[in-house]
Structures are given as structure tokens and as C-alpha cells.
Image (cartoon, rainbow, N blue to C red):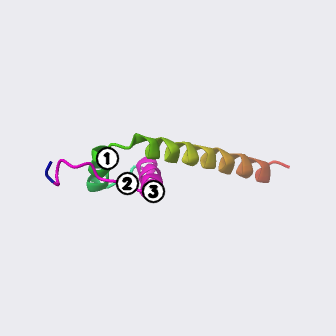
């Protein structure tokens, strides 16, 4: 297997950053290709769940801060 065909490892931190950047639409093409070349979808699923929970909590906190 050549280096180009070998799946790359994506750390949990890289997966979380990729999910964050993709959500805002500023993901680079190189990172997107790296993400799709990795064979580990579980890190992206976990990162997506963490990001979603954080986003929901941020909205709840913001609404509770604004409403008396």
C-alpha cells in the first residue's frame, strides 16, 4: 500500500476542529480530503455529538441570560 492510499489517522482534537470549521463553512480542501481519507468515522461522530451538545448548551445559557 503506498502512502497516498494509506488511511491517515485523525486525532480527536483534529476531528473536533474539523467539525467546527465545517459547520462554519471554512474547512480547507486539504483538511476535508484528509478527513474523508481517514477510515475512522467514530471520532467524527463523537466530535459532532460534543459540538452539538456544546452548541445547544450555549443557546440555552444565552436565552436564560437574556430572559428575566
Q: CA distance from mark 2 to mark 3?
A: 11 Å
* Contact between labelled residues 1 and 3, with CB atoms less than 8 Å apart: no
Q: CA distance from mark 1 to mark 2?
A: 7 Å
The mark that comes first in sequence, 3 or 1, is 3
From the image, tell me which residue sits under label 2: 10
* Mark 3, other Cα within 10 Å: few <14 / some 14–19 / many ≥20: some
The magenta stretch spans which residues? 3-24
Q: Secondary structure at mark 3?
A: helix
**Magenta span includes 13:** yes
* Contact between labelled residues 2 and 1, with CB atoms less than 8 Å apart: yes
Q: Considering depth in this image, is 57 or 45 the residue closer to the camera?
A: 45
Of badges 2 and 3, nearer the viewer stands 2
Report whether 59 appears left or right of 33.
Answer: right
Report whether 17 appears left or right of 9.
Answer: right
**Magenta span includes 20:** yes
Q: x, y (%) of residue 24?
A: 45, 50
* Mark 1, other Cα within 10 Å: few <14 / some 14–19 / many ≥20: few
From the image, tell me which residue sits under label 1: 38
From the image, tell me which residue sits under label 3: 17
Q: x, y (%) of residue 22?
A: 41, 48
Q: CA distance from mark 3 to mark 1?
A: 15 Å
Amino acid at each position: 500500500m503506498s502512502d497516498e492510499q494509506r488511511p491517515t489517522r485523525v486525532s480527536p482534537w483534529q476531528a473536533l476542529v474539523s467539525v467546527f470549521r465545517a459547520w462554519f463553512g471554512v474547512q480547507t480542501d486539504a483538511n476535508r480530503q484528509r478527513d474523508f481519507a481517514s477510515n475512522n468515522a467514530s471520532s467524527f461522530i463523537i466530535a459532532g455529538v460534543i459540538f452539538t451538545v456544546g452548541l445547544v448548551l450555549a443557546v440555552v445559557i444565552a436565552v436564560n441570560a437574556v430572559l428575566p
